[in-house]
Structure formats: structure tokens, C-alpha cells
Image (cartoon, grey):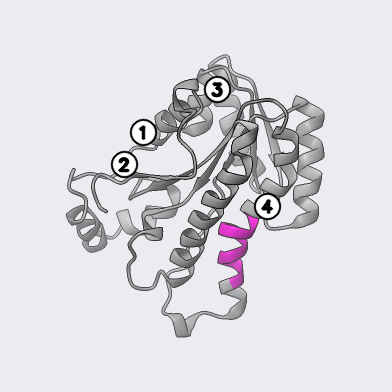
Amino acid sequence: AMAMALAEQGASIALVARDAAALEEVVQEIRAGGGVAEAFVADLTDEVSVDALQEAVLARFGKVHILINNAGMNLRKKIHEFTLTEWKQVTDTNLTSVFLMCRAFVPHMKGQGYGRIFNMTSIMAHVSLPERTAYSSTKAALLGLTKSLALELAPEGITVVGISPGPFLTEMNLPITQDAEKNAMFLSKIPVGRWGDPKEIGALAAYLCSDNAGFITGTDILIDGGWC
């Protein structure tokens, strides 16, 4: 949804994930609307893969203005049920990937007088639920990264903002929406009484990339239907 919204505003889109087929679907959707998009297959938890991605993206587009750190996963388990490997899997995906991507692309964003970095945090960085220890830990850590990086990059005209979605109808939340009891529990916590539409996050990202949002940095925007 963010890729589509930014493409509609004229941005060229570098789409990154591990699933080539899923990437290609979005590429074709953007191109069908007259936009420019390219797919790049990469594992964002792997340093070598991110370095190769950096070279590939720059070779294709020449420069980068906007970085959206959107890779994420959630394992719902009691703390004593986690293996160290599982804990690291969540941490690497949700937090280390952001470090690797920022380290790779921030140097190329400097010197242009404009830049936007969005870190997809979560309401689970502000509140939590049982069996979310790994997820909440990584998302809360992202808030700290966002604040520090915003101060570091402010002189460059690069803003850094966290976006904290509440319950949205995304693939990661399918196990909840398909369970009537859990779905009802989630809806009971959302004052507006519905799940979020991903297009609403797309619209927010498009606004934050505009010149009108240049004074917004180092903060986290809750888009949660009033949950928090």
C-alpha cells in the first residue's frame, strides 16, 4: 500500500523481499498504473545480502531519497517456550534489518537536502499483550533507534519517523482474523470498531514524504483506531 501510494506521487519504487513472486505482483500493479518499480530479492537480516542490495538498487536508480523499513515478523509464545534461535530470528528481522538497511543507504541519502526514513514500529511498542515479549521488545527498541537517528540526520534535511500501526488487515494478522474469538477480542479494543485498511498507511506515508511534513521527525505516529 505504501509502495502504491508513493508511486502515484511519482516516486520510483525499489521493492525488496525474499519472495520473488510476491514482489513481481506488486511491480506489475505499479507499472499498470503508470509507475516505475523494480523488484530486488534480498534477505534483510543478512549483511552480505544487504550490501549486494545496496549495489543493485544504486545501479538501477542512481540515488535514494526514501527508505521504509517494513520487514517484520512475530512469534507468539510464552517466554520460556522461546528458543534462542527463535528470539534472534525475531530480533534480526525486526531490528537488525533496520540497522543494516540504514547503514547501507543513509550515506547515499546525505547531501541532497531531503530524505525520509520510516521505521514500522507498532502499538506493541507502547502497549502489549501476553506472548509478545520478542515482538514488543524489538518494536520498543525501534523507537529508540528512530529518535537517535533523527537527531543524527536532521542537519541533512533527512527526517526519521516511526509509524505504529494498530490492527491492520495484513497477512501477518490472518491467524487473528480467522479466529472468531480472537477477532472479537481485537475489535473490542479498537474504539473505531474496525480493522485498519492498509491504504490508510499508504496515505500517511505519502503525506510524510511531502514537503508539508518536513517538520515532523524523531517521533512515532500511532495509526491504531484509538487503541492506545
Q: Which residue is mark 3?
A: 7
Residue with the mark numbered 2: 196
Reading the image, the residue beneath label 1 is: 200
Q: Position of residue 135 (x, y in %)?
A: 46, 64
Q: Give the residues in magenta.
A: 88-97
| Side of 212 relative to 68 (left or right) | left
- In the image as oriented, which residue stretches furthest toward the bottom? 80
Q: Looking at the picture, which amino acid does disc 2 mark?
A: Gly
Pick whichever of labels 3 and 4 is earlier in the sequence: 3
* Label 2 secondary element: loop
- Measure how far apart labels 2 and 1 are at the Cα level: 7 Å
Question: What is the tally of numbered marks visible in this picture?
Answer: 4
Q: Nearer the viewer, residue 2 or 29?
A: 2
Give the spatial CA distance, label 2 vs label 4.
26 Å
Q: Amino acid at mark 4?
A: Leu
Q: Which mark is residue 44?
A: 4
User: Callout 4: few (<14), some (14-19), or many (20+) C-alpha neighbours within 10 Å?
Assistant: many
Nearer-the-camera pick, 95 or 158: 158
Q: Are marks 3 and 2 in contact (CB under 8 Å)?
A: no
Residue nearest the viewer, comparing 67 with 153: 153
Q: Position of residue 37 (x, y in %)?
A: 64, 26
**What's the distance in space between the residues labelled 1 and 4, CA to CA?**
25 Å
Residue in view at x 82 percent, y 30 percent:
59
Whether residues under marks 1 and 4 lie with C-beta atoms below 8 angstroms apart, the answer is no
Q: Is residue 95 magenta?
A: yes
Tag 3: amino acid: Ala
Disc 3/disc 4 C-alpha distance (Å): 22 Å
Neighbours of disc 3 within 10 Å: few (<14), some (14-19), many (20+): many
